Amino acid sequence: MEEKILILDFGSQYTQLIARRIRELNIYCEILPFNKIPEITSEYVGVILSGSPFSVHDNDSPDINFDSFNNLPVLGICYGAQLIANKNECIVAKSKIREYGRAKLSYVNSESILMKGVELDSDVWMSHGDSITEITDSFQILASTKDVNITSYYLKNKNYFGLQFHPEVTHTVFGRKILDNFAVKICGCSQSWNPERFVEYTINKIRDTVKDDKVVLGLSGGVDSSVAAMLIHKAIGKNLYCVFVDNGLLRKNEFSSVLSSYKNLGLNVIGVDAKQFFYDGLVGKTDPEDKRKSIGKNFIEIFEKEAKKIGDIKWLAQGTIYPDVIESVSVKGPSATIKSHHNVGGLPEKMNLKIIEPLNLLFKDEVRKVGNQLNIPKDILNRHPFPGPGLGIRILGEITEEKVNLLQNADDIYISSLIKNNLYDEVWQAATILLPVKSVGVMGDERTYEYTVVLRAVTSLDGMTADWSRLPNDFLAEVSNNIINKVKGINRVVYDISSKPPATIEWE
């Protein structure tokens, strides 16, 4: 990759949004913690400093050595802007009131490259407790609001820029334009990064890294593991061994349908029926973490057994994507962290496998674009995310085979109805949850005392935040009626209208 923007994270809730906005400009970027600044090679063309919950005056506030940037253009956002100012003899002071929410630009220096095309009186989004109150003659003010005089600046002798507001959030009307100005006009990015180039680059990198070694990958049937498998397959062919484990917690008929869907892709797939093994390990467990650990531990045991059968495995491949890496505070390169929903507790050391994660620099929507470039079938590519523990975290309380069957049948009606009514692709993720709650119902002349299920559907880009889907009332009524009439043991259906945050997408 010829060029990239380095984003240094100081702990802001918006850091991933910065990366997303840069990627949307067809520019490659990477997020690293502020204390993990890499060697600045010729690939780097610019640096963005994120916001932070810290104040520059805190004793333990994050700090960096600006000399390491080798005179690259730097854009400081919120805390990043305050840090630049503070290190260059400006005054950063506690705001009289915390400045949070919309503000309007009362002054814009339209001659400046950074602010080119930004309109006066347009909205920007503030979120800071400190303000830059005084600057030296080396600084030039580029924008102001009614309450914040130094809303944006340019440090002339350093080619450093600062913004007190957040251009990465949609509330800042010309935020995308500002980031475009910085990345393209100031840093000189060519905007050439796309899925096709990523595929070519990644296949060559895998081939050079793995060579003739054998690689094992745990398939889930989902987007991430499927795209990772196809990338590795393109690189090393039959030296990739895919293992798909039926843990008894998959959706209805999923084991057979997933195996069938991979037949035409040329992948070397081993299917393992381990339902009873997982059920036995879950007896008596009601705590969500205990269930996850049991599922993870048993997955490792099965996976290790299958890897030994193959023999001479040198690499473990995973479908880890960029949000997983960022959240675990991992750095670039093969991550040493194994996703908890796949392998809670980590791999046994005796397996001694090296890790390869070909998607660990991509967001979920980018993974789908890469999958499309690889001609992966739409039924795999557009499949909703499905958690590693599967229905194990959608059955609250103890898991039994009877409860799994109930949930599978109810969920099958729900998902099939979404597909039938052309609603499946409008939803980012849909799920059915079985509650450990029974309630009274009336069916015909009989009273029933049966389980309740929750229908969940959300819209999202990458799962980091999500809003509940406004599915049609008539549709929900039909699904509810079908579940109650066709699944004996369920007599009540409710719909979850909570968003993330504060609620998570999954219930456990």
Image: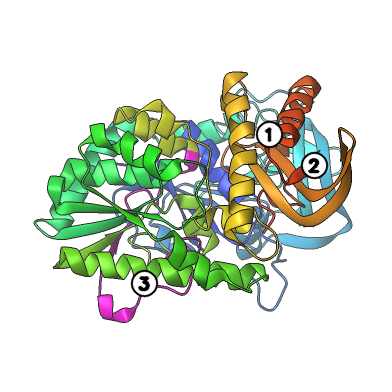
Give the mark nearest the N terminus, 1 or 3.
3
Question: Relative to residue 334, is residue 322 depicted above or below?
Answer: above
In contact (CB < 8 Å): disc 1 and disc 3: no
Disc 3 secondary structure class: helix
Residue at position x 32%, y 46% in the image: 228
What is the number of the mark on residue 301? 3
Mark 3 Cα-neighbour bin, 10 Å: few <14, some 14–19, many ≥20:
some
Q: Which quadrant of the rendered structure holds the N terminus? A: top left
Residue at position x 71%, y 23% in the image: 119
Mark 2 Cα-neighbour bin, 10 Å: few <14, some 14–19, many ≥20:
many
Q: Looking at this view, is 242 or 24 the one in front?
A: 242
Give the mark nearest the N terminus, 2 or 1.
1
- Asked which quadrant contains residue 494, the reply is top right
Q: Looking at this view, is 5 or 231 the one in front?
A: 231
What is the number of the mark on residue 491? 2
Mark 2–mark 1 Cα distance, whole angstroms, equals 10 Å
Residue 65 visible, this orientation: no
Mark 1–mark 3 Cα distance, whole angstroms, equals 37 Å
The amino acid marked with disc number 1 is Lys
User: Is 207 displayed left or right of 505 in the figure?
Assistant: left
- Which range is magenta? 336-364
The amino acid marked with disc number 2 is Asn
